[in-house]
Amino acid sequence: MIKEPRINLATHDVFNQAKPLVDRNLFLIDQAMVDGVRREAGDWLFQKMSVLGEEVGSEQVLNWGDQANRHAPELQQFNRFGARIDHVEFHPSYHDLMSLASDHRIHVVAFSKPGKAPHAGYAALTALFTQADHATMCPTTMTYAAVPALLKSPEIGQPWVDKIIGGIYDAPLRPISEKSGVTVGMVMTEKQGGSDVRANTTTAEALSDGGYALTGHKWFCSAPMSDGFLTLAYLDGAMTCFLVPRILPDGSLNTINVMRLKDKLGNIGNASSEIEYHRAWAERIGDPGAGIKSIIEMVHHTRLGAVSATLGIMRMALAQAINHASGRMAFQKRLIDQPVMRAVLADLQVEYEAAVALVLHIAARFNSHAPEEQAYVRLAVALAKYLLTKRCPNFVYECLECHGGAGYIQDGPVARLYREAPLNAIWEGSGNVIALDVLRTLAKEPVAFETYVAKIEVVDPALSGDILRLFENGAPPESSARHIAERMALTLQSALLKDAPMAVSDAHRARIADPSRTYGGGSVQIDIDAILERARF
């Protein structure tokens, strides 16, 4: 950015413009996140967030995020001699961002036992880093989520886990024995099935060397330059999980053909691709026929990643809106002092505070060994995934509209956030899939629902009574899955806001009693001044 732009032009002076939101500690100016980190994790995470907040808020790192998403990755299927290489070339800023995320141990903090609530560390750091860039959080999250899956077959997975936990970002593809660190992707869906992975057709054939040859296609392979992929294939008619390395132990390229890169609406910096396995060499993870069981823990963790990244997108959009409204005059007042704008920003702040409380609450309980807590977390992360990712696009849109026409221009940061906003609702199970997962969990694991109700009842029996009435006629039909997921998620948020200032908790409770279809459109009077005092920076 030009440090001293020319503002005295021939026809007019440039003035009444908000200063760019750069060189600010993006953690310390976020009171809701500061409170949540202190409550759920404590000093160890506060310190890590403070350091990362300074870096990701710098003009340099924010520019890396902009550049990595303006210059899309490019696929080079062949080299100049005609040999197949299936190489994806990234803008240098992408590698800078990956190195920064690795240096801050975002992908492994949950497994290094730094203190209370290690997975809250992963979630909070992911949300914070996403404010600078969402694209690199995809491979970071998949690598984080691969660890529990790889450990299901430690004789195969442990060398990979050692390189994940003890390693650093090392981009060039080589055998893992020669690398300083590795990344691992997840490749599941096929054209004909999508989320219905049982409709997959990829097959595996046992080889004499103890490995397997995989043949088939995958419709979505994000981060195709990962060092290895967890994938599903049918072995003797049974769905099984496999680890497919990009580079074979002898240094040769595995027969994974990258057919094309996806031309996506957003998340440009991340290379999503379509691939084919041409008898690609793989190793089995978990028991034959236990593919879904082997991979479900990874999906559980990537859903936490999806809601954490959603939180980051929401926060950056809101921060940009508050920054603009604080620095822009309209009709003889700053925008942030205009009554209608204040109502909108206050409502957005309440939404964000509720999202922070929900995500950090769930993440802090991810490492619980109590069976009832584990069941509850499986339910709660699905509820969060459903509600937050659904709310995110409209949330970001309202933040964009706070900028007027300037928000719609690609030069600024909010347009990119708007293109990112729908993605996490689609990744790791779209809305219908998640809502149906909620119903299945309620049916298969009654203790999950019992624990959920108990956590709400201790705060407010009236809230838990509202939820119980949803089930007074027995199990709800599938057609009501979205309604059930939304009501349960909103009610849990209201209960968790018991630790927030009264102005915030009361405003969220009013939202349940008097729902509005637009931000700032509720009829119940809320304490806008107190809410916006927490939003200012």
Image: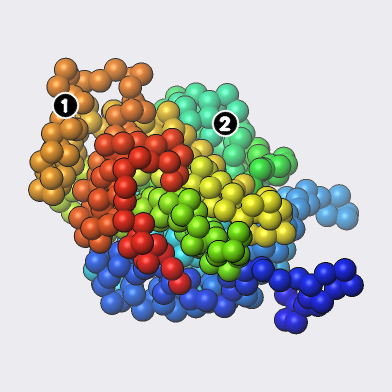
Residue 39 placement: quadrant: bottom left
Residue at image location 26% in from the left, 45% down from the top: 509
Disc 1 residue type (three-letter): Arg
What residue did someone put label 2 on? Answer: 190
The tag on residue 469 is 1
Determine whether, in the image, residue 178 is placed left or right of residue 263. Answer: left
Mark 2, Cα crowd under 10 Å, few <14 / some 14-19 / many 20+, is: many
* Residue 144 at x, y percent in the picture: 43, 58
Determine whether, in the image, residue 465 is placed left or right of residue 393. Answer: left
* Residue 20 at x, y percent in the picture: 62, 70
* Residue 481 at x, y percent in the picture: 34, 25
Residue at image location 36% in from the left, 28% down from the top: 482
Disc 2 residue type (three-letter): Glu
Mark 1 vs mark 2: give the one in front: 1
- 52 or 220: nearer the viewer: 52
The tag on residue 263 is none
